[in-house]
Image: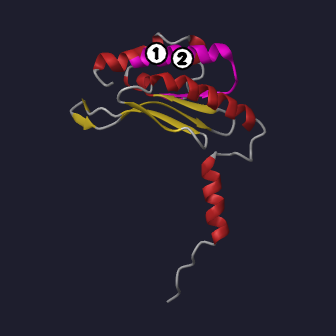
Amino acid sequence: MSTPKKASPKKIVAKKERALIKYSDKSKGQPEMILIFDRIKKLLLPFEKGVMKIHGGEGGQVFLISHKEVEISGKKRTELWFASALIQKGYVGFYYMPIYGYKKLGEQIHPELMKCLKGKACFHIKKNDENLFKQIEEALKLGYENYKKLGWV
């Protein structure tokens, strides 16, 4: 019977380095993505109050989560994600959970920002555009008010 091979220390270190910023050494546009990420992170900061807490912020990922115990559709939750950002290869993924739970919110968000929506709640932000950041800020305010109305923050 042969013994299982262990991963070499070099491979383990390489995996840890890759986890810091995804695709950090593979994308020519990475410095631009870091600027976009930093702008989105700054937009999340004013919402860190009460039960809303920011997690991460380093390594190309940041999360804003409500830590209030709530019941949604009969299920108790101890935390509820609000928004996050993650640096990807050619874009920054801006994950905006209020739109996932309340589809009509999309009608109130600026059409230019809605063009960046690539899934149920993921916006691909590819350019460092002041108008786009203002629209993200407005969307965050709308989402926060919606969470507040529902008693989630």
- Mark 1: few, some, or many residues within 10 Å (few <14, many ≥20)? some
Q: Point out the stretch of residues depicted in magenta.
A: 119-144
Q: Name the outermost residue toward the left.
A: 74
SS at circle 2: helix
The quarter of the picture where residue 116 lies is top right
Q: From the viewer's perspective, tell me whether residue 8 is left or right of residue 97.
A: right
Callouts 2 and 1 close, C-beta under 8 Å: yes
Residue at image location 31% in from the left, 15% down from the top: 149
Q: What residue type is disc 2 on?
A: Glu
Q: Name the outermost residue toward the bottom.
A: 1
Residue 111 at x, y percent in the picture: 57, 12
Label at residue 141: 1
Residue at image location 52% in from the left, 84% down from the top: 3
Residue 18 at x, y percent in the picture: 64, 52
Q: Is residue 139 located in the magenta-colored stretch of the structure?
A: yes
Q: What residue type is disc 1 on?
A: Lys
The quarter of the picture where residue 13 lies is bottom right
